[in-house]
Image: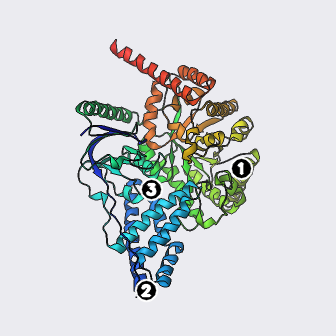
């Protein structure tokens, strides 16, 4: 068997070597039948729904125990689908009116709903198509009495190879035996990639055709850092990767030693490494990975996957729990950031042609003030249990910040009048994700306590390129000099007024971006928990004066490629100096 190299997308770092386990989809063969006893057929459909509910509830509880509330919320969405009249009523209508068998009726209705979701511009709604397919397959398996593969039954060390992994699939993975996975489809922000990073399982996604090139039992090398899968490697390649694997594990061991260390450059300059989280379980994981703060608590997860707004009490408990777990370390909590790719069905907002530029985040909160005031009250009540900082998202104008700040002070005054204790040291900041805000940073800096740069949106708005659109994805360039200049503008404006600046987009944890951001003077880097220790290790190698020179050069070039070349050259020079000292 000749060696094959398959390039995909690097989804989760690490190198693993094991036999391939092909996840074959069980064919669900559905034929249309005429049924005479309609009531019996509807009853059969409802029993299948109930069986699926029991399974999904079990998966939800298992996921909560292993990975926390945010990941478990995926299955709350699945439970909502199983109870959705827009799915159930048409299926039962087809059975009743067309005397159609339940599985054919379900397939017809689900296919229409999947097509509707896939044609929507919202990335969040497109993900609902995958959820609908997952749930439908589970109900159909019960109707057809076909056993769906249970990945938790794998009992030997393997690399899983599949078309894609659904939420149900990933919840069943046993990390002791599934060492990594590779899929035909997916990207860095797909569900399977996010879960892989949470579980710290090396993964390569988006290979397009790996299933046609790999057979059960083939020896695979999976390099999740490079997005590479090598099938049936020759002895020399296998030996090389065994050495690389050992080197990577040594790195992980070295990173672990930095867990309780401050984040310092080689010449003693300090920056703060923080974590992005979605719930209190994530905070525990962030602390285990050595975070010095929470730089972004995404509160929208409290509102999603349910059929009504979370109460003030529910929110208070959630915020209080995170603040207490952090034991005085700073916690930046972002107010409700709904809209764009995140929708709340129970709000029944009108559909928009371009939701990313529409009625979302602070715009929604300032109009639907009762929702916003409840969240502010919950935050204020929780503030006495830790070091709270509140951040308003999607701020485009000074007026928006002033309005949000005024509502904050109104609710604070009401609570104080009720003799409810609140902190007097809450910092109020904004996300810088709109170019207008970056351009006016000098004025904002006179009124805010801090900035946090949300690069995911700042990049797509600056480059006028939807980051979810594959045809223009080449324009999503974090290292483009125009982006770096905006970042510098914000940092310089803040520092002139004695304010601090963080970054909570993906760029903050990127090893190419970090040396430049240190040189630009970024004060706080907020990233996924798994990125913190590698980032701390990298920063420890950097010299502040060297990164400042690097940043100046990067601001002076014309393309993202030139910036990347500058960083690569700089890192190579650092490695060469280390090697030279070792050889001496």
The residue under label 2 is: 38
- Label 2 vs 1, first from the N-terminus: 2
Task: Kindly check if marks 2 and 1 are in contact, taking CB atoms under 8 A apart as contact.
Answer: no
Category of crowding for the residue at label 2, using alpha-carbon neighbours closer than 10 angstroms: few (below 14), some (14–19), many (at least 20):
some
Q: Position of residue 153 (x, y in %)?
A: 26, 58
Q: Position of residue 434 (x, y in %)?
A: 67, 43
Numbered tag placed on residue 442 in the rendering: none
Q: Is residue 405 above or below residue 37?
A: above
The residue under label 3 is: 71
C-alpha separation, residue under disc 2 versus residue under disc 1: 59 Å
Q: Is residue 76 visible?
A: no
Between marks 2 and 1 in the image, the one whose residue lies nearer the viewer: 2
Task: Kindly check if marks 2 and 3 are in contact, taking CB atoms under 8 A apart as contact.
Answer: no
Numbered tag placed on residue 405 in the rendering: 1
In this view, the residue in front, 153 or 115, is 115
C-alpha separation, residue under disc 2 versus residue under disc 3: 39 Å
Q: Is residue 359 above or below residue 477?
A: below
Which residue is most to the top?
A: 584
Question: Dot 3: what SS?
Answer: helix
């Amino acid at each position: 068997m000749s060696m094959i190299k398959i390039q995909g997308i690097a989804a989760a770092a690490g190198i693993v070597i094991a036999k391939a386990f092909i996840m074959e989809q069980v064919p669900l063969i559905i034929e249309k039948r005429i049924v005479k006893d309609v009531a019996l057929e509807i009853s059969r459909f409802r029993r299948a729904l109930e069986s699926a509910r029991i399974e999904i509830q079990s998966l939800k509880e298992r996921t909560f125990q292993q990975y926390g509330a945010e990941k478990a919320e995926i299955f709350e969405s699945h439970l909502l689908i199983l109870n959705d009249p827009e799915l159930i009523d048409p299926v039962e209508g087809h059975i009743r009116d067309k005397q159609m068998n339940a599985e054919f009726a379900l397939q017809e209705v689900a296919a229409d709903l999947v097509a509707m979701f896939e044609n929507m511009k919202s990335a969040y709604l497109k993900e609902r198509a995958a959820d609908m397919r997952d749930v439908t397959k589970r109900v159909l398996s019960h109707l057809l009495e076909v056993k769906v593969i249970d990945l938790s039954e794998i009992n030997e060390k393997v690399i899983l190879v599949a078309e894609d992994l659904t939420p149900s699939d990933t919840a069943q993975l046993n990390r002791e035996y599934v060492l990594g996975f590779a899929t035909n489809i997916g990207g860095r922000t797909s569900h399977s990639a996010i879960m892989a990073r949470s579980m710290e399982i090396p993964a390569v996604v988006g290979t397009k055709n790996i299933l046609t090139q790999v057979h059960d039992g083939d020896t695979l090398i999976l390099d999740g850092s490079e997005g590479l899968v090598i099938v049936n490697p020759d002895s020399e390649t296998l030996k090389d990767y065994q050495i690389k694997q050992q080197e990577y594990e040594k790195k992980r061991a070295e990173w672990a030693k930095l867990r309780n260390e401050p984040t310092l450059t080689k010449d003693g300059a300090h920056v703060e490494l923080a974590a992005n989280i979605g719930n209190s379980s994530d905070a525990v994981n962030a602390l285990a990975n050595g975070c010095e703060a929470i730089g972004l608590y995404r509160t929208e997860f409290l509102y999603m996957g349910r059929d009504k707004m979370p109460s003030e009490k529910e929110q208070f408990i959630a915020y209080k729990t995170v603040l207490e777990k952090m034991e005085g370390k700073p916690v930046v909590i972002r107010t409700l950031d709904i809209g764009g790719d995140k929708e709340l069905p129970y709000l029944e907002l009108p559909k928009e042609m371009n939701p990313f530029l529409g009625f979302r985040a602070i715009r929604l909160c300032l109009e639907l003030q009762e929702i916003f005031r409840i969240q502010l009250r919950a935050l204020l009540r929780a503030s006495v249990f830790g070091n709270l900082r509140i951040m308003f998202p999607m701020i485009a104008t000074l007026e928006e910040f002033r309005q949000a700040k005024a509502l904050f002070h109104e609710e604070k005054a009401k609570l104080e009048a009720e003799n409810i204790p609140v902190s007097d040291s809450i910092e109020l900041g904004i996300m810088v994700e709109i170019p207008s805000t970056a351009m006016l940073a000098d004025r904002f800096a006179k009124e805010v306590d801090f900035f946090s740069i949300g690069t995911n949106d700042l990049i797509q708005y600056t480059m006028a390129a939807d980051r979810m659109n594959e045809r223009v994805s080449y324009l999503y360039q974090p290292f483009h000099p125009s982006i770096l200049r905006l970042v510098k503008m914000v940092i310089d404006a803040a520092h002139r007024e004695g304010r601090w600046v963080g970054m909570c987009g993906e760029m903050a944890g990127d090893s190419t971006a970090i040396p430049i951001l240190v040189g630009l003077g970024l004060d706080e880097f907020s990233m996924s928990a798994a990125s913190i220790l590698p980032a701390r290790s990298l920063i420890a190698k950097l010299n502040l004066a060297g990164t400042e020179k690097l940043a100046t050069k990067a601001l002076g070039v014309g393309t993202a490629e030139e910036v990347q070349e500058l960083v690569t050259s700089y890192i190579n020079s650092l490695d060469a100096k280390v090697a030279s000292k070792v050889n001496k």
